[in-house]
Amino acid sequence: MHEFSIVQSLLTLIEDYARENNAKSVTKVVVSIGVLSGVEPHLLEMAFNTFKEGTVAEKAELIMEIEKLKIKCMDCGKESEKEELNMLCPGCGSLNTQIISGQDMFLKSLELEVD
């Protein structure tokens, strides 16, 4: 379950950012998770709730924004947001497409409580 190592890295980022901004705690953590990122949201939430104890994010709420797959067709130029997880262009049917978004996970924002 790679979500544990992802959360450990996420908590390191959170701790560093909180320290740099003299925050006494973090109240909200917002992450963006692409549907092709390989991250399972329910496992990420479970890992976050387990590992946040004893950290500056101990009382933080985790908000996960799921990012849909967005592709661009290299044949017709159409950009599409896909409901299904395939690379087929809905405009012309080509498979000559490129992923624009939906394959990454990143820390989007934090709410900090400062002294």
Image (tube, rainbow, N blue to C red):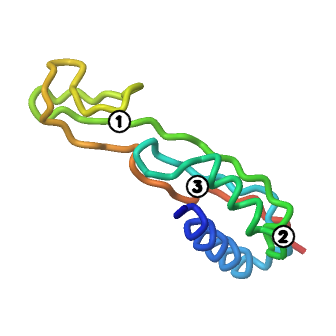
Instruction: Determine which residue is flagged by label 2.
Output: 25
Mark 3 surroundings within 10 Å by alpha-carbon count, few (fewer than 14), some (14 through 19), many (20 or more): few
Q: Relative to 88, does residue 109 appear above or below in the rendering?
A: below
N-terminal of the two: label 2 or label 3? Answer: 2
Q: Amino acid at mark 2?
A: Ser
- Point out residue 19 in the picture as x, y percentages from the top left corner: 73, 81
**Upstream in sequence: badge 1 or badge 2:** 2
Secondary structure beneath dot 2 equals: strand
Residue 47: x and y in percent read 68, 61
Question: Callout 1: helix, strand or loop?
Answer: strand
Q: Residue 70: give its label.
A: 1
The quarter of the displayed image where residue 1 is located: bottom right
Residue picked out by circle 3: 108
Q: Amino acid at mark 3?
A: Lys
What's the CA distance linking mark 1 and mark 2?
35 Å
For the point 60% across and 47% down, which residue is it? 41
Residue 67 position within the rendered picture, expressed as x and y whole percent measured from the top left: 49, 40
Q: Contact, CB < 8 Å: mark 3 with mark 1?
A: no
- Element carrying mark 3: strand
Is 40 left or right of 104, judged from the image as shown? right
